[in-house]
Image: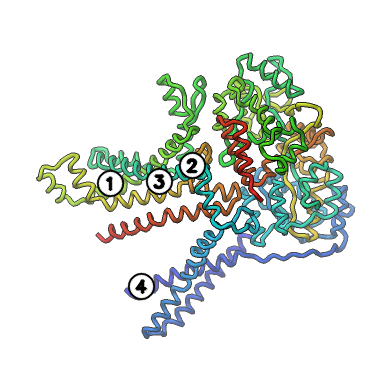
Amino acid sequence: MRSRNTRRWAAAAAALTGAGLALAGCASSDSGGGGSASGTWPGEGKSECKGLEQLADFGDLTGKTVSVYTSILPPEQQAQEDSYKLFTTCTGAEVKYEGSDQFETQLVVRVKAGNAPDIAYIPQPGLLKTVVSSGSAVEAPSQVSDNVDKWFGEDWRNYGTVDGKLYAAPLGASVKSFVWFSPKMFADNGWTVPETWDDMLSLTDDIAAKGIKPWCAGFESGDATGWPGTDWLEDAVLRSAGPDVYDQWVNHDIPFNDSAIETSLDDVGKILKDDKYVNGGFGDVNSIATTAFQDGGLPILKGDCAMYRMASFYAAQWPEGTDVSQGGDVFAFYLPTMSDEFGKPVLGGGEFVTAFSDRQEVQAFQTYLSTDVWANEKAKATPGGGWVSANKGLDINNLKSPIDKLSAETLQDPNAVFRFDGSDQMPSAVGAGSFWKEMTAWITGESTDQALTNVENSWPAS
Amino acid sequence: MSTSEKFVQMVLAIVLFYSVMAIILLLTQRLRSRAGERVQAAAFLGPSLLLIGIGLLYPAIVTAWQSLHGAALFDPPFVGLDNYKTLFTNPQEITVLRNTLLWVVLTPLFSTGIGLGYAVIIDRARFEKFAKALIFMPIAISMVGASIIWKFVYDYKAGGSEQIGLLNQILVWLHLDTYNFLLTDPWNTLFLIVILIWIQAGFAMTILSASIKAIPDDIVEAARLDGVGGWKMFRYITVPSIRPSLIVVLTTITIATLKVFDIVQTATGGNFNTSVLAYEFYRQNFVAGDQGLATAIAVVIFILVTPVVIYNIRQMRKLEGR
């Protein structure tokens, strides 16, 4: 009996030791440090590498690898990887792509552990700031800075800049200032796409007079329930108070419950908190809180509601076979402005290419991604649509789907004033916490004043 | 690292670990004295103690230490007991505590009650196996799956339109107004608790039914001869005989309830004042990025669970000792 027990102990201890060893084996070593360019670049004389001459600065990178960490997952991942083939052709360096649905959390863990990727596509300017403040991110090379000046507006450059230094160039973009509608339904009823906010309100009344609820909305989104409400408010602030007030509000230079913001939320309330206007196909105002944003616009197809304010990426939510185009089953129009004072504010999002290493191949890849060549390459590699960039060198004809074209036109409009989604820039206790929560409470009955005051009180002290 | 490299590493690790074990065995087998046995014991216990230290004690201590720090992702400042103060004074967190209390009180009581009642009623009935399978089935479904099923049951559409939700369809048939079950607090928490009761009642029923069957026949027969039957039999014979199992079931469900996360996450995402401690921990840590408050919540959950776990283990030992 005794010997049997001893053996069992041995086995247990052995198994544990083995596990420990296996774990130790997982930690791999990582070498860093920049080098100088050597040799001519492999793209020399190749016709497909035309327009990428900047990459010659980095020399021959054959055999080098760049690791990329991102939240972009299949099927979009394939299109991303396809668009990097040209980079390999022209420089010789390979790109190792890793996507994660826990990107925001895991990136911080990896940076803290000294295991940062070469490049991360950070989808939130707030997180970019946090990461830069940790001291591990590397400033973008001059080639990237030149490209950002050439191809992107100053608004976009600012979002990749921390403390006056450009760290990250924009990658993709999405447009949130859209209202989805049914062109067929509008044509049948003689309605026209509104050009101003007031037009939109009178159209709302016209539709309601027909016995149709003009608007539908859905705030439910699991952990993130309430975010569609934050988008509504942000769009309204941009239109009634303008981009400057918007920036002050996002950076907390004015209180969250400033009177300008209160006016804007009341503007939203005039649409969303009126039982005559919402919530087509679902019920009363309260039902907005429990309707999933993915389902929110679907009643348009049945004619139960006429308009749904939601970002460009909603295109993917329509059932298969829906004709998403001008004159089709559904399409989107630009959420109209309240006055001409502030140009055409565009609320949206996007990713920023942040580097954690200054190795030649990493800087070369950053440069590649900031060129117009890549933007067009990416558009061609995305046959299904659903991708767009704010890069002004992007040829709209290379985009496949009508909604992508509309997004690109909206972003490239000379009057467009781009502003990044505010909740993504605020401290996460607000932007991923109280702001969502209070918008949900607001739609289920809380007063405008109370909701905004609650968010203001939750703003972190430091 | 490619897959083949990983396999090579795995094989290397196994070889290494066998050789380490061989060395320990070789070195210690010569020791025959009493002191030698102690060395032997230490040689074998050492690695596992070390790993428990790394895997259990160290994280626990770090968690407690982090709970005294602020929200910043990098280098959070020391804030003392502020996070605990927030947890017990902020109205939102107080709602979380209230909900947790509702869960912990109601779920074990109702699951065990329903499980026990069901076990007694179907005991030796004609369709016992089938009836047991019916109530046991929900255990086989994952918590997330169950929550999605129930989310459909509770689904809300305005009175006039076509209903997807079973309960609201029933309300429509009864000519009543439809009701948004998951929206109004505190009732929505009760509707969520129903989901966990639905899952756990089967567990309670299985354990309790087995221990009812284990009551010695002579006791039951003796009671019958004394003229005991029906309610009295249940009250004075059945319940006292299965008391230890009852307590184990109650405490096990309590522990599971303190950790309930999936149902809240799936059904409401913690909105509309339905959040509970375990969910709030996740949300603060991974969504709101406040590791300080999150770890404080983790510590509170740990403190709440510990006495129940100790009591549970003691009862189990008693049960085994019988």
Q: Which residue is mark 4?
A: A4
Q: Which mark is in front, 3 or 2? A: 2
- Residue A184: mark: none
Q: Which residue is mark 1?
A: B209
- On whether disc 1 and disc 4 are found on a single subunit, the reply is no
Residue A108: give x, y in percent of width and height.
Answer: 65, 55
State the separation of the CA atoms marked 2 and 4. Answer: 54 Å
- On whether disc 2 and disc 1 are found on a single subunit, the reply is yes
Element under disc 4: helix
Residue A356: give x, y in percent of width and height.
Answer: 73, 58
- On whether disc 3 and disc 4 are found on a single subunit, the reply is no
Pick out the residue farthest to the right: A45
Q: Which mark is in front, 3 or 4? A: 3
Element under disc 3: helix
- Residue B104: mark: 3
Q: Mark 4 and mark 3 in contact (Cβ < 8 Å)?
A: no
